[in-house]
Amino acid sequence: MFAKHVTRDLSAYCHGELSPQDSRGVAEHLIGCQQCRAEFEEIKLGVKFAERLPEIAAPDSLWNDLEARLDDQISAPARNKSRRFGAGRWQPRFAIAATLILAVGLAAYWFYERESRPSWAVARLDGSPTIGSASITDKSRLAVGQWLETDNVSRAQIQVSSIGQVEIDPNSRVKLVETRPTEHRLELARGRLSANIWAPPRLFFVNTPSAVAADLGCAYTLEVDDDGGSLLRVTSGWVALQLKDRESMVPAGAACVTRRGIGPGTPYFEDASESFRRALSKLDFEAPDSDWSSRDQAFNQVLMEARPRDTLTLWHLLSRLEVAERALVYERLAALGPPPTGVTREGVLQLDDKMLKAWKAGLESSWSNQSGLKKAWIKVWSGALGKVKGMEGKK
């Protein structure tokens, strides 16, 4: 059905009007089709603008004009008849009727608002998960603003609109923050969830105390500890972890740690050595002035152990280190994955955005490559270290 472009279905998809099967087909097409993706972004932008339009009360002059026009439509016989029966007799009855109509209208409105409140379907998998203070027997719904909680033996599954599912593990607390055509968002306060999403990039988000996970069409697990830190593991596709202007792009097979007050650390592949991961954690989360010698050792450890696919980590480090260390990262990165034409050393050290993105695009193929580390890195690393230290001595 979706072998061709899906432009005719984009509006319905954006408003959640397609079946789950058709929604998944559109989403998968959007991930790989730039033309349809561009049109979808325009539709999303239009919906966002419409959502921001303010509600403005009609001016009193409009109502006065309407009343005058209605009076003109009343025939003279009708006015005479109303005079004959007497206005005074009907005024109390009219007031009572108006009050009853208003009460019924308000009740209907309240019921409609409650029943039509945006919500997602929830299914109990194990134990007795709760929404608010009510236990979930088999199936229920999670409305915007409500918390779903599991104890140590409970699990639940949430249907994320028409774009995927999220499983909630034991001892977890999650809230539905927003659901609309341009954004679906959960908040994970503690515990662990597993997401399987087939939406286009940046349509599904999960807030945590230390970062926001932005889905780029993928499957992943996300867990939050008691201190508000989190661990993201991606099994398919990509996820972006963000906090203010700090972002980590995490592909399948990689993980990333976050810390409250700091945000996302540097992503790494899970088959990296334990010493590599410990050294990277020291670089990410220990204060630079806490122990310079220890930090230098950690920095050298990361560079020395980096494999071709660890260019993922090195590329992220470029924008997170001072110029002297950035130069060393550049040399090591260039040895493992030479920069493409047009990407210069000077531009990278100045963090030229175009050059960084072009180099990232060239490196991505190695991020799925399981090849081992080449022994030639030792010679390259030693030469790069001497070159940079010589530059520092001249200064």
Image (spheres, grey):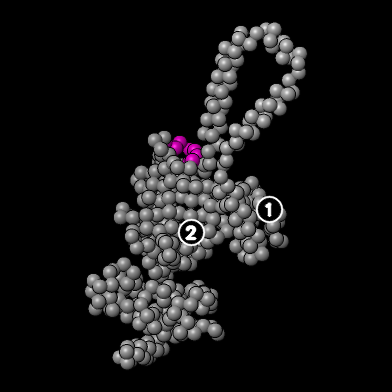
Left or right of 183? Residue 300 is left
Query: The disc labelled 2 sits on which kind of residue?
Result: Ala
Q: Foreground: 188 or 308?
A: 188
Q: Residue at x 48, y 42 (%)?
A: 144
Q: Answer whether residue 136 is magenta in the image.
A: yes
Residue 84 at x, y = what percent? Answer: 70, 7
Q: Foreground: 321 or 78?
A: 78
Badge 1 marks a residue whose secondary structure is helix
Q: Earlier in the sequence, mark 1 or mark 2?
A: 1
Count up the numbered dots.
Answer: 2
Identify residue for label 1: 9
Q: Residue at x 57, y 52 (%)?
A: 48
Residue 108 at x, y = what percent? Answer: 56, 27
- As drawn, 173 above or below 248: above
Q: Answer whether residue 28 is magenta in the image.
A: no
Left or right of 106? Residue 388 is left
Query: The disc labelled 1 sits on which kind of residue?
Result: Asp
Badge 2 marks a residue whose secondary structure is strand
Identify residue for label 2: 214
Q: Quadrant of residue 10?
A: bottom right
